[in-house]
């Protein structure tokens, strides 16, 4: 996380935060503990700065190195308004994600594939059906590489004779 964010959160300078966000600083940047500015503002009970960060699309789902979210930090701090704000933001961000996931696409059919790793362990994988266009592209790519392989083999044989 950029040092400016840490300093501004210590100063609780709302206007400075606003200027940084307007100038393109990432509201989801992280420090060495994977804590975001939202983590820090929530842990300090800084409601106005948290609102500003959420408006700048700070993620409520980010977790730090201990697995704690900004919402967890707000609950520890006991600021009921901040907890409510983050819970509402979590619901909003979750609904945005779920409505945008797979938008305009049908859900692919899946099947289960069980394979073996090099170490002999069994692994389970979900295999999704490809789009017909993907298969055509793959066939063209394979035929191109097949052509190159045959060409290289032919050139190698010519050199050796």
Image: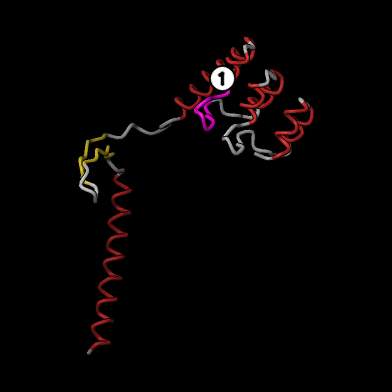
The picture places residue 122, in percent across and down from the top left corner, at 21, 41
Name which quarter of the figure residue 25 lies in: top right
For image coordinates 33% across by 31% down, the residue present is: 107
Q: Is 95 in front, or is 70?
A: 70
Q: Secondary structure at mark 1?
A: helix
Q: Which residue position holds label 1?
A: 71
Task: Please state, as top left, top right, bottom left or bottom right, where the C terminus lies in the image.
Answer: bottom left
Q: Which residues are magenta?
A: 61-71
Q: Is 78 in front, or is 151?
A: 78
Task: Please state, as top left, top right, bottom left or bottom right, where the N terminus lies in the image.
Answer: top right
- Whether residue 124 is in magenta: the answer is no
For image coordinates 71% across by 39% down, the residue present is: 3
- Does 136 sit left or right of 69 as displayed? left
The picture places residue 20, in percent across and down from the top left corner, at 74, 35
Name which quarter of the figure residue 74 lies in: top right
- Does 140 sit left or right of 86 as displayed? left
Q: Is 67 in front, or is 47?
A: 67
């Amino acid at each position: 996380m950029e040092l400016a964010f840490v300093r501004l959160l210590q100063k609780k300078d709302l206007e400075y935060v606003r200027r940084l966000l307007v100038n393109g600083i990432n509201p989801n940047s992280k420090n060495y503990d994977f804590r975001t500015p939202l983590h820090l503002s929530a842990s300090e009970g800084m409601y106005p700065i948290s609102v500003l960060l959420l408006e700048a699309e700070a993620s409520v789902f980010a977790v730090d190195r201990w697995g704690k979210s900004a919402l967890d930090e707000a609950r520890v701090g006991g600021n009921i308004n901040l907890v409510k704000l983050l819970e509402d933001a979590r619901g909003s961000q979750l609904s945005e994600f779920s409505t945008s996931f797979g938008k305009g696409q049908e859900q692919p059919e899946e099947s289960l594939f069980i394979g073996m790793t090099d170490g002999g362990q069994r692994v389970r994988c979900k295999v999704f059906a490809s789009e017909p266009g993907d298969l055509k592209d793959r066939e063209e790519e394979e035929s191109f590489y097949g052509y190159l392989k045959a060409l290289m083999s032919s050139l190698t044989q010519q050199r050796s004779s």
